[in-house]
Image (cartoon, grey):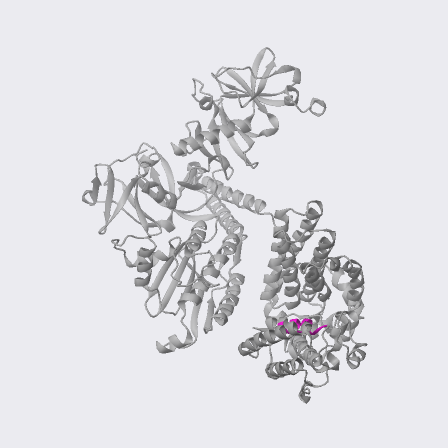
């Protein structure tokens, strides 16, 4: 297995299994080990005074978990829900090294694929146009490019923005 | 005599004076003062050691030690004869020391004290002793090597439950100690580990002190001091000290094993004798900075292990209980005796095997306790909650409702019964009675009353009331503080009480009971009540209120909860420990409870604490704002009504106020605050809910009242907890999430201008 032999740095370390999903016309991937389950879009209770992409909370078999809409988070144009829209429940690590469950709304879940180190390129430098901190790398799979996300950092960004929202 | 003599004489005289002081307070049948007296006598013993003191002095000290040892061996309360003897002993010692100082021959020993020979056992444990009394040491030869060890006799009859709890807790602490030691071996300075071991010993001390397990308490106390020194970097942990801690843990474990054997019904009422004296002396040596003491002590541990295995010699003799032990046991003995007789004889063929048996018998906690990870427990409670929701969804399903089947109805009713029973059981898993916390208060009150020369009786009721375990634990500190207050500030001195025509014996009631879905804990003293003028004066002086403020009676009483407020004229060791009533209130609010004061001048003060049954469930009022449902904890809701238009007035056309029966209270439109499109914008069409936090009230405007329900409160998850206005979420009957409002935060937030408009 490539996971055991690769050096623990750079793009090589990022090789492994990813769950890919679509957001608008783009494709993204998250490490499959962090995915807990995928559920259909359900009734979300909005939480006041949260950033716009935090849609609220849901009841996941008795546990209350927050849900963020990645389409809003990444400022994508189309945020209409369809039959394929679903929530990926992920285990995310918070900065204080605790971990929690969080739901992410995506347009459609694709598949689980194995991405080798050779297929991963570092995130391009967009300059100031785009904050690419939470991008692990770009994977070239079957002619398409998928953006690999560091989900923990996406969530850190949620927290930081949240503080601004409360203070504002 | 040369100079070297002067210091001990001074010290001796000092100790004797203190001892005389303690003796004044000693009463037959109580153990107050026993430990200090024991300590003073030990110090006198130490001071005399190596001094060319007259032989009579040494004999007298030995005699006193013997009296005390007799007390420790039998019960741990004073009896009248010992008090009389000590009362006689003290002046004799004083005069003897005086004679010694003036180089006169010592007065002869009173004949009633009997021969001093039997007390000579101490010699053996004090190898350095210069007291040479040939008669004494020869008499000691057949005596036990650990003659001065304290024996434990359990009061199985009355303390059984407490002992069981003590044992259960102890297992955990012992584990902590062992785990901690492993960490310390790697990293001797690890502050967390030092603290956790310290706490473990500290809890041992507290628990054993409460149960009168003096030998355990003494040992735990020394070990605690050892860890405390390490914590404060006065002591560097080396391998010798780690050995010492481990030995301490092992000794405590031995005690625990013995106690659990007795709780299991074997050897009930037997003395428990585990040698602790050597260990205590080693710890003391380390603490006094005697570096050699710990290392040569090491082989001593091995040596000690042998005597401890041999102490059964003592026990063998003790199997036929000594006369002193017999007196003390009273009625418990007959039952215990029967148990011993019923046990198969091979179990106790000799003392030695009993000892072996003690460690090989599995710990006697099979009496029905399982330690469960709280995470698992919470998961179970979550799932049960979901089951209840699923059940009601099935029962209320429109298709099912249309089915006219008696069989189905019966089955559904059965399902409902089982689920609600299951829910009740799941909730009860977290509940424990407040008994042990209440009983600790007896001690607090007794010690404090003695210290302040007041006569106070604590009357407990409702100790079996059950509360969430977390609440019971968190309740302990505020309760201790409030009990202290009740005795310190509440109950007057006997003289003052007499002058006011009250009985000299003050009464403090501590009650727990259910009231409307809450648990109420009440502390009532029959003292003089709160002095409102003094409260006001003090608050003005400290700038907590303005001189012009006009406060209601309730607000005046609430002043004592203000931070930095203390009416105690002087900071004693009782008041002014940095834990004020503000902390008490904050702790109770953290538990989602509230405190109320009720005071009648001249007749006393009542503190009433309202607490939720469990931390997991709150009684909530469900309201709708816009399309969303919110839950307001019923405990903070004072009333709700539909206002008449004329009761609402505005300032600058923005700040709205509601006139609630003559008192103006700010209006907070929840829909504005939560940015929800509301169904109604006219307050006269909506509902006003008056909430209170402390003495402050706010009127929350909502669209509708939907009902009242008990909900299981849940955290909104780490990623969302920054919104102070929300206390959490709850899964409502239809499976959706409702948000629970944090009223305290709402009141504070809406007090800061700007946020309401945001």
Q: Can residue B577 be seen here? A: yes
Q: Is residue B78 left or right of residue B488?
A: right
Residue B194: x and y in percent read 63, 51
Q: Is residue B505 above or below residue B383?
A: below
When asked about the image quadrant of residue A166, the answer is top left
Judging depth in this view, the residue of B734 and B264 nearest the camera is B264
Residue B617: x and y in percent read 46, 48
- Residue that extends furthest to the top in the rendered view of this protein: A143
Residue B694: x and y in percent read 35, 51
Q: Is residue B159 left or right of residue B660?
A: right
Q: Which residues are magenta?
A: B40-49
Residue at x-position 67% and y-position 73%: B3
Position of the C terminus of chain B by quadrant: top left
Judging depth in this view, the residue of B394 and B356 nearest the camera is B356
Q: Is residue B202 above or below residue B742?
A: below
Q: Is residue A93 above or below residue B387?
A: above
Residue at x-position 48% and y-position 45%: B412
| Residue A46, magenta (yes or no) | no
Q: Is residue A103 left or right of residue B701?
A: right
Q: Can residue B369 be seen here? A: no
Residue at x-position 74% and y-position 51%: B239
Residue A64: x and y in percent read 49, 37
| Residue B45, magenta (yes or no) | yes
When asked about the image quadrant of residue B507, the answer is bottom left
Residue at x-position 65% and y-position 57%: B226
Judging depth in this view, the residue of B303 and B331 nearest the camera is B303
Position of the N terminus of chain B by quadrant: bottom right
- Residue that extends furthest to the front in the rendered view of this protein: B2
User: Taken as a whole, is the magenta stretch helix, strand or loop?
Assistant: helix
């Amino acid at each position: 297995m490539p996971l055991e032999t690769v050096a623990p740095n750079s793009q090589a370390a990022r090789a492994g299994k990813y769950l890919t999903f679509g957001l608008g016309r783009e494709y993204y991937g998250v490490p499959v080990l962090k995915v807990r389950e995928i559920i259909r879009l359900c009734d979300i209770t909005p939480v006041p005074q949260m950033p716009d992409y935090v849609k609220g909370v849901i009841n996941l078999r008795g546990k209350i978990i927050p849900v963020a809409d990645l389409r809003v988070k990444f400022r994508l144009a189309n945020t209409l829900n369809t039959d394929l829209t679903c929530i990926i429940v992920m285990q995310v690590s918070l900065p204080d090294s605790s971990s929690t469950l969080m739901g992410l709304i995506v347009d459609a879940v694709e598949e689980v694929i194995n991405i080798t180190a050779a297929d991963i390129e570092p995130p391009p430098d967009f300059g100031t146009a785009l904050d690419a901190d939470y991008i692990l790398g770009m994977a070239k799979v079957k002619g398409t490019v998928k953006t690999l996300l560091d989900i923990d950092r996406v969530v850190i960004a949620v927290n930081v923005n949240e503080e601004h929202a409360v203070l504002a | 005599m040369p100079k070297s003599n002067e210091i001990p004489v001074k010290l001796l005289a000092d100790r004797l004076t203190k001892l005389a002081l303690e003796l004044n307070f000693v009463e037959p049948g109580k153990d107050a003062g026993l430990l200090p007296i024991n300590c003073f006598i030990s110090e006198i013993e130490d001071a005399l050691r190596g001094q060319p003191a007259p032989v009579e002095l040494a004999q007298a000290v030995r005699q006193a030690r013997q009296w005390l040892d007799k007390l420790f061996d039998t019960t741990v309360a004073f009896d009248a004869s010992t008090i009389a003897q000590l009362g006689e002993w003290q002046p004799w010692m004083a005069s003897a020391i005086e004679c010694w100082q003036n180089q006169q021959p010592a007065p002869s020993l009173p004949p009633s004290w009997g021969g001093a020979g039997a007390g000579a056992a101490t010699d053996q444990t004090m190898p350095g002793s210069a007291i040479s009394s040939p008669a004494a040491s020869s008499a000691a030869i057949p005596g036990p090597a650990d003659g001065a060890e304290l024996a434990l006799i359990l009061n199985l009859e009355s303390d059984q439950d407490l002992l069981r709890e003590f044992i259960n807790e102890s297992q955990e602490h012992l584990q902590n100690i062992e785990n901690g030691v492993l960490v310390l071996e790697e990293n001797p300075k690890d502050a967390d580990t030092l603290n956790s071991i310290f706490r473990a010993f500290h809890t041992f001390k507290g628990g054993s002190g409460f149960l009168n397990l003096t030998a355990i308490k003494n040992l735990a106390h020394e070990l605690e001091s050892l860890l405390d020194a390490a914590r404060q970097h006065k002591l560097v942990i080396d391998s010798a000290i780690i050995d010492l801690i481990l030995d301490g843990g092992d000794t405590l474990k031995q005690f625990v094993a013995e106690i659990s054997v007795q709780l299991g019904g074997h050897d009930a009422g037997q003395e428990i004798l585990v040698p602790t004296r050597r260990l205590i002396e080693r710890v003391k040596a380390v603490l006094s900075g005697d570096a050699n003491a710990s290392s040569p002590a090491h082989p001593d541990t091995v040596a000690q292990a042998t005597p401890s295995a041999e102490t059964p010699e003592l026990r063998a003799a003790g199997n036929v209980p000594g006369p002193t032990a017999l007196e003390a046991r009273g009625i418990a003995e007959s039952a215990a005796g029967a148990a011993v007789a019923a046990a198969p004889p091979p179990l106790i063929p000799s003392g030695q095997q009993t000892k072996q048996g003690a460690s090989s018998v599995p710990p006697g906690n099979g009496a029905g306790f399982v330690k469960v990870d709280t995470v698992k427990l919470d998961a179970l409670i979550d799932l049960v909650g979901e089951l209840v929701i699923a059940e009601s969804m099935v029962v209320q399903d429109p298709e099912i409702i249309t089915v006219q089947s008696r069989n189905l109805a019966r089955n559904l009713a059965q399902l409902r019964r089982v689920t609600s029973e299951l829910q009740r059981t799941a909730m009860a898993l977290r509940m424990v009675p407040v008994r042990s916390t209440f009983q600790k208060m007896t001690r607090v009150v007794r010690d404090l009353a003695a210290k302040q020369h007041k006569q106070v009786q604590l009357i407990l009721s409702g100790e079996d009331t059950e509360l969430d375990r977390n609440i019971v634990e968190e309740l302990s500190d505020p309760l201790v503080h409030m009990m202290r207050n009740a005795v310190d500030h509440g109950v007057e001195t006997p003289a003052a009480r007499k002058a006011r025509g009250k009985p000299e014996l003050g009464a403090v009631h501590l009650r727990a009971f259910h009231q409307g879905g809450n648990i109420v804990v009440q502390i009532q003293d029959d003292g003089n009540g709160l002095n409102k003028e003094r409260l006001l004066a003090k608050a003005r002086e400290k700038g907590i209120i303005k001189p012009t403020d006009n406060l209601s009676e309730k607000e005046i009483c609430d002043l004592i909860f203000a931070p930095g407020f203390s009416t105690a004229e002087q900071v004693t060791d009782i008041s002014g420990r940095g834990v004020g009533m503000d902390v008490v209130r904050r702790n109770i609010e953290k538990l989602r409870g509230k405190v109320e004061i009720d005071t009648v001048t001249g007749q006393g003060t009542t503190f009433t604490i309202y607490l939720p049954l469990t931390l997991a469930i709150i009684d909530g009022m469900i309201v709708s704002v816009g399309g969303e449902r919110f839950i307001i904890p019923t405990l903070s809701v004072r009333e709700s009504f539909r206002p008449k238009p004329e009761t609402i007035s505005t300032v600058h056309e923005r700040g709205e106020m509601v006139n609630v029966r003559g008192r103006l209270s700010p209006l907070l439109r929840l829909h504005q605050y939560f940015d929800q499109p509301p169904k109604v914008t006219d307050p006269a069409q909506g509902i006003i809910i008056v909430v209170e936090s402390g003495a402050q009230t706010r009127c929350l405007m909502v669209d509708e009242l939907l009902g009242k329900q008990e909900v299981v409160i849940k955290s909104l998850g780490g990623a969302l907890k920054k919104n102070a206005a929300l206390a959490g979420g709850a899964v409502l009957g239809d499976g959706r999430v409702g948000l629970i409002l944090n009223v305290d935060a709402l009141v504070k937030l809406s007090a800061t201008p700007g946020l309401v408009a945001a």
